[in-house]
Amino acid sequence: QVQLVESGGGLVQAGGSLRLSCVASGSIFSINTMAWYRQAPGKQRELVAAITRGGITNVEDSVKGRFTISRDNAKNTVYLQMNSLKPEDTAVYYCNVRLSTSWYATSDYWGQGTQVTVSS
């Protein structure tokens, strides 16, 4: 059994910062890509940023230069540092992790989501 626990969301004024964390625990054999998605009301879930085990990152254009994704492989944790937040960043942010529970079983797992609200 695998669990993803997110933390760090909240209410912040425009221009402020937040740092999201997501810890994976349970029967983990290895972790591949870790990512953050977000879903605003009435919109589809979208990729915000992703990072490979080796540290290669992919960041969505609208947050490039403001958001930074990083990970600590020893702690099975992925972070999203969000600076210069804008009201349009308001959404529920979800952690997504592709991991293996054995050498032959790989799946995507999702966190429960954490609300980020940016006031103008």
Image (cartoon, grey):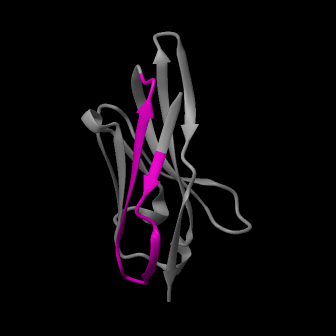
Q: Is residue 95 above or below residue 65?
A: above
Q: Is residue 89 above or below residue 114?
A: below
Q: Residue at x 51, y 31 (%)?
A: 2
Residue 69 in magenta? no
Q: Residue at x 60, y 54 (%)?
A: 46
Furthest-right residue in this view: 42
Q: Can you give x and y, in whole percent of width and height, for residue 67 in the image? A: 37, 62
Q: Residue at x 48, y 42 (%)?
A: 4
The answer to which image quadrant residue 23 occupies is: top left
Q: Please give left or right for residue 92 compared with residue 86 in the image.
A: right
Q: Please give left or right for residue 88 compared with residue 20 in the image.
A: right
Q: Is residue 94 above or below residue 110?
A: below
Q: Please give left or right for residue 53 compared with residue 28 in the image.
A: left
Q: Can you give x and y, in whole percent of width and height, for residue 85 in the image? A: 42, 75
The answer to which image quadrant residue 12 occupies is: bottom left
108 and 3: which is toward the camera: 3
Q: Can you give x and y, in whole percent of width and height, for residue 28 in the image? A: 43, 24
What residue range appears in magenta? 5-28
Magenta portion: prevailing SS class: strand
Q: Please give left or right for residue 99 compared with residue 91 in the image.
A: left
Q: Residue at x 39, y 61 (%)?
A: 64
